[in-house]
Amino acid sequence: MALRLARRRSATQTAQAVSAPAPGSHRNHMKRNELKAIGPDPLRPDARLRWRDHFTLSENVLHVPGMHREHDGLRIAHLSDIHVGQATSAVRIRRAVAEVNARNPDLVFLTGDYVTHSPKPLPRVIELLAGFSSPVFVVLGNHDHWVDAHYLRSGFERLGYTVLQNEHRVMHLRGAPVTVLGIDDGRTHRDDVETTFRGAPESGTRLVLTHAPPTIDKLPPNGNLVQFSGHTHGGQFVVRGLTEAIFRRAGQPYIQGHYHVRGNQLYVNMGLGFGFGGPYLRRGTYPEVAFFTLRHVETASAHA
Ligand SMILES: [Fe+2]
């Protein structure tokens, strides 16, 4: 099954799907981004698996102006909205972790909502999400704050994962610094962009994690930043024309996939949890594990 980003409409006048630049666009310095493939998960042949244990896997290429040249080809895995509990298959989560490890990305990003309403699954979250073999960066979502943010933070830190709540870290990969900025959840009004960016490098490879997509509107414009988010579950139950209007009205113009917003980029993951039965059905949207390959783009100033 091959779905293309072309089917996605732009969310706002400033956010455009990546399939083709709009006529007269000023994005001429930006190469075309690509969603290479999205389809059934690669582990599917196991006949004993139930449909609810599956996920889709997306492969995305992001062209990032201003990124360090050394990071051309950098690989990132992104999981979001895992919502451990009855509505999400534990087998699906285990298989997603195994698939990430099999592809050995440079970084793993987890962008929030590990639980839903009950605190009961909290120990299962840490158990199921243990074992990533690449460096893991974590931000929290609205449901995590409503249930027990402290438990989740300390649990992930025990696994050696880096949890960022309005904080940033600079790490060295392939001989150059990567700045990872983790902004806390905007749905619960905890997204403090100023504090997150204070003291951080103002150029180079800068990757932003935050649960709620609209935080993109608060980022410094023209920063060549890439923001990874979730929260929307790709619209959860998509009825053409209606779902987008409802999300817009709820202040969520960015529903699924890739957008350009004020000189930065955004990817909204459909989330791994829910769907295929249980109380939280999906329609027109699929549990997703997203992979990214970053591509270096020469900027005008680099030639000056
Ligand atoms: Fe959420």
Image (cartoon, rainbow, N blue to C red):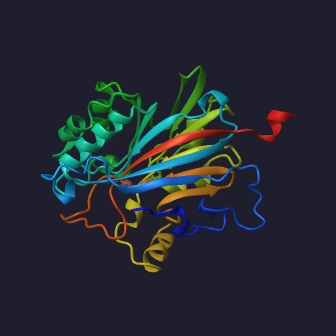
Residue 187, visible in the rendered structure: no
Quadrant the C terminus occupies = top right
Q: Quadrant of residue 116?
A: bottom left
Compared with 152, 134 (above or below) is above
Give the percent coordinates (x, y) of residue 78: 42, 44
Q: What residue is shown at x 56% (from left), y 52% (from top)? A: 266
Q: In the drawing, does residue 108 fall left or right of residue 69?
A: left
Residue at the outermost top position: 175
Q: Pick whichever, 211 or 194, lies toward us.
A: 211
Residue at the outermost right position: 304
Quadrant the N terminus occupies = bottom left
**Which quarter holds ligand 1?**
bottom left
Residue at the outermost bottom position: 241
Q: Pick whichever, 297 or 145, lies toward us.
A: 297
Q: What residue is shown at x 59% (from left), y 19% (from top)? A: 175
Q: How many marks?
A: 0
Residue 185, visible in the rendered structure: yes
Give the percent coordinates (x, y) of residue 243: 43, 74
Residue at the outermost left position: 48
Q: Pick whichever, 251 or 269, lies toward us.
A: 269
Give the percent coordinates (x, y) of residue 295: 61, 40
Compared with 34, 166 (above or below) is above
Q: In the drawing, does residue 35 fall left or right of residue 239?
A: right
Give the percent coordinates (x, y) of residue 44: 25, 51
Q: In the drawing, does residue 109 fall left or right of residue 167?
A: left
Q: What residue is shown at x 20% (from left), y 35% (from top)? A: 127
Compared with 196, 35 (above or below) is below
